[in-house]
Image (spheres, grey):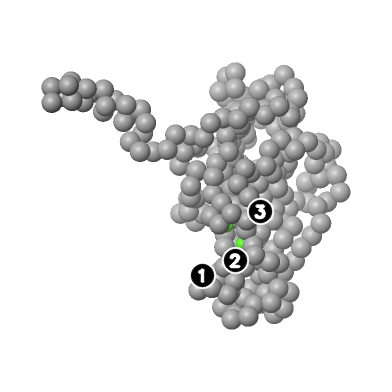
Amino acid sequence: MIAITKSLPIILILLAIAGCGRKPAPKRVLLNNGEGAITIEADIWADNWFALYLGDDLLIEDSVSIKTERSFNAECFTFKADYPIVLNLVAKDFKENASGLEYIGTRKQQLGDGGLIAQFREASSGKLIAGTNSKWRCYVLHHGPVQEACAELSDPVAGEGPCAFTELEEPEGWKTAEFSTADWRQSSEYSESAVRPKDGYDQIQWDDQAKLIWGPDLKKDNTILFKIVIDKPSEQNDE
Ligand SMILES: [Ca+2]
Ligand SMILES: [Ca+2]
């Protein structure tokens, strides 16, 4: 009994460090497939899946398959790059077929929503060099169903009536630094209550400058390209 009493403060301290049950952040993975003098620490959470490219080179894909039910997880990793850093991201909300629906034929048949948040820091200074926000340009590749009524049908058929959809090809050369996103739209920022981020999101300490983003329609936009070019911090204007 005396031993327990004596060790109680230590147990309490250990619980406090552990965040009282809060899961620790995922182990930061060191990626070897980036090149440059700057080491960047990145955190990304996506509903449901993402692939991140440094220019044309694939840096990392979401480690949990989009086909996994409730594939919610955060990825923490480190890579090397040089300014200006060209980040290209493909994000996908899960859809069972081209209609955009999920849980088809069950009582849970629905549109399903997306959501993405990411932050990038210089490892040496800890300075945030980019967080997802409306400055990120986006281009919706798959949008569907065109009407929510699709989810109410007992036999929804992709491409028919309210279950029509639009699907575009990736623009040629969109991952290059020179590609102009002038005709892409700005990403939409969403609140936590709109996205209701799930597993993994709470394991990350998100900077205030990193927002949950998606296309203009959180439910109907299902595959989206995001692009941002990060200039050297001293050359960034503080607009
Ligand atoms: Ca989803
Ligand atoms: Ca959707």
Q: Secondary structure at mark 3?
A: strand
| Disc 1: which residue | 108
| Disc 3: which residue | 92
For residue 166, side relative to residue 30 (left or right): right
Q: Secondary structure at mark 1?
A: loop
Q: Can you see residue 181?
A: yes
Q: Quadrant of residue 4?
A: top left
**Residue type indicated by callout 2:** Glu
Give the alpha-carbon distance from disc 2 to disc 1, as whole Å: 8 Å
Cβ atoms at labels 2 and 1 below 8 Å apart: yes
| Disc 2: which residue | 102
Q: Find residue 42 and name its label.
A: none
Quadrant in the picture for the N terminus: top left
Percent across and percent down for residue 181 are 78, 46
Q: Residues within 10 Å of mark 3 (few under 14, many from 20)?
A: many
Cβ atoms at labels 1 and 3 below 8 Å apart: no
**Residue type indicated by callout 3:** Lys
Percent across and percent down for residue 25 are 48, 34
> What residue is drawn where x is 54% and y is 45%?
73
> What residue is drawn where x is 48% and y is 53%?
196
> What residue is drawn where x is 31% and y is 31%?
15
Which of the two marks, 2 or 3, is nearer to us in this view?
2
